[in-house]
Amino acid sequence: MRVLVVGSGAREHALVWKLAQSPRAPELFAAPGNAGIAQLATCLDVAAEDVEGVITAARSNSIDLVVVGPEAPLAAGMVDACREAGIRVFGPTKAAARIEWSKSFSKRIMDSAGAPTAHFEVFSDHEEATEYVREHGAPIVIKAEGLAAGKGVVVAQTVAIALSALDNIMLNRAYGDAGVEVVIEELMEGQEVSVFTFTDGKSLTPLVAACDYKRIYDGDKGPNTGGMGGYSPPPWWDDAMEQEVRELLIEPVIRQLAAEGTPFEGVLYGGLMLTDEGPSLVEFNSRFGDPECQLIMPRMENDLLDVIDAVIDGHVAELDLRWSAEATVAVVLASAGYPSVYATGKPITGLADGPESTIVFHAATAELDGQTVTSGGRVLAAVGHAATIAEARTLAYQAADAIAFEGAQHRTDIANFDV
Ligand code: AMP
Ligand code: GLY
């Protein structure tokens, strides 16, 4: 069996790593992959967003299954295109992935499903949006309607910040057409948690939970990033909470999407906030999280190919998905200057020097003159797995500390609940 994973980050490395353990011993390919993925798969020179390129590559390499990692190809209709071409594919259609690529659609679905979420209004007129912000005051949350690589959301503590966000998104078009409309919503306060379920549009697996760290510096200071680390499961996550979140927030949305003729088939990622009034939805994503995928793949006891088959073939109701009781912690190593301007091409050492029970997933690496070098902002994710979060944390930091490249930075407070 030949499987092609689309994407090039640590999330995709974690997927390839897990697929490589399948008893079915699939032959693995990646488009385009990275230096870590290349140790387990054949990397093809095709960009993740290149729908036609992926179809052509799948055909010429006799691929039996395509697994789409990132949101951009899902929003570009890669799953629809694969299906039309008769290629077996894991991921939601463009219409179902709209739950991620359109914030106003997503909020409307949550509302129609009766799932708790912050009160919101949608604006396409800059002046009306400005007036609304002036009337309502701060704090207030401003969101670009479309995909903005995780940068289109401003949690504004003052009216001035909110107004400048509106200017930036709607007038300056900082995120292009993603800013044709904005969603303006109420601020929610509480602990954030990411939950994941596999669904065929009819049934869903029990939720698995993880927490990530979005800010670059310790103590949640500095600008937002793609994610600087995380842990799973959260120590306070229990069966009662899983059931409440599933029944109140996730199942109704899966039912609503199906009722509207766009059933979601894939892995659905719910971002939620545990507020004083109970759990409430922040957003949905149509894919695995990054770094959450690096946290949950080492905890999955099933063959990932069986899980994918159940989703594609509509047998999720019969799937017995099991997560190990082990805890995982991920520490991301980033280039100096990230998330702003950074250099690449820095040689990396110590990749294999971490202790047992650690895995180093590559996020942005390349092979240059026989050496592994940095090739992006977030470079690596060091993951530790152990009986407790505290032990997993120690292991992840030992693996991270063994690695060196010029200007490497990481947070020192990941999964440290004492600070
Ligand atoms: P999103 O892209 O919708 O996930 O937003 C990115 C981040 O902004 C979330 O992970 C939250 O930390 C924050 N955020 C979004 N919406 C709200 C809200 N209504 N209240 C508080 N924080 C929010
Ligand atoms: N962990 C955030 C994301 O994957 O969008």
Image: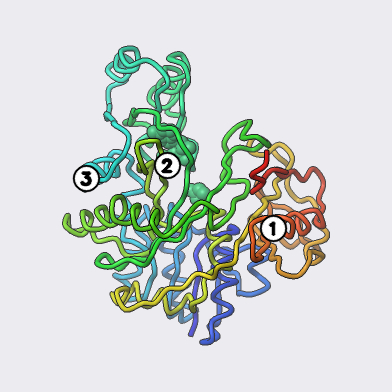
Q: Residue at x 74, y 56 (%)?
A: 394
Q: Nearer the viewer, mark 2 or mark 1?
A: 2
Q: Which disc number belongs to residue 205?
A: none
Give the amino acid at mark 3: Gly
Position above or below: 133 against 54: above
The quarter of the picture where residue 59 lies is: bottom left
Give the amino acid at mark 1: Ala
What residue would you read off at disc 3? 114
Q: Is 225 placed left or right of 176 in the picture?
A: right
Q: Residue at x 56, y 45 (%)?
A: 226
Foreground residue among 353 and 169? 353
User: x, y (%) of residue 63?
Assistant: 46, 79
Position above or below: 79 against 314: above
Question: Element at badge 1?
Answer: strand
Applied colour scheme: rainbow
What residue would you read off at disc 2? 274
Position above or below: 141 against 106: above
Give the amino acid at mark 2: Leu
Q: Which residue is drawn at 75% across and 70% down?
A: 356
Mark 1 and mark 3 in contact (Cβ < 8 Å)? no
User: x, y (%) of residue 406?
Assistant: 82, 46
Position above or below: 105 against 26: above
Q: Nearer the viewer, mark 3 or mark 1?
A: 3
What residue would you read off at disc 1? 382
Q: Say which label, 3 or 1, has the lower sequence index.
A: 3
Camera sees residue 344: yes
Q: Is 112 placed left or right of 180 in the picture?
A: left
User: x, y (%) of residue 257?
Assistant: 23, 55
Q: Residue at x 47, y 47 (%)?
A: 193
Question: Element at badge 2?
Answer: strand
Camera sees residue 95: no
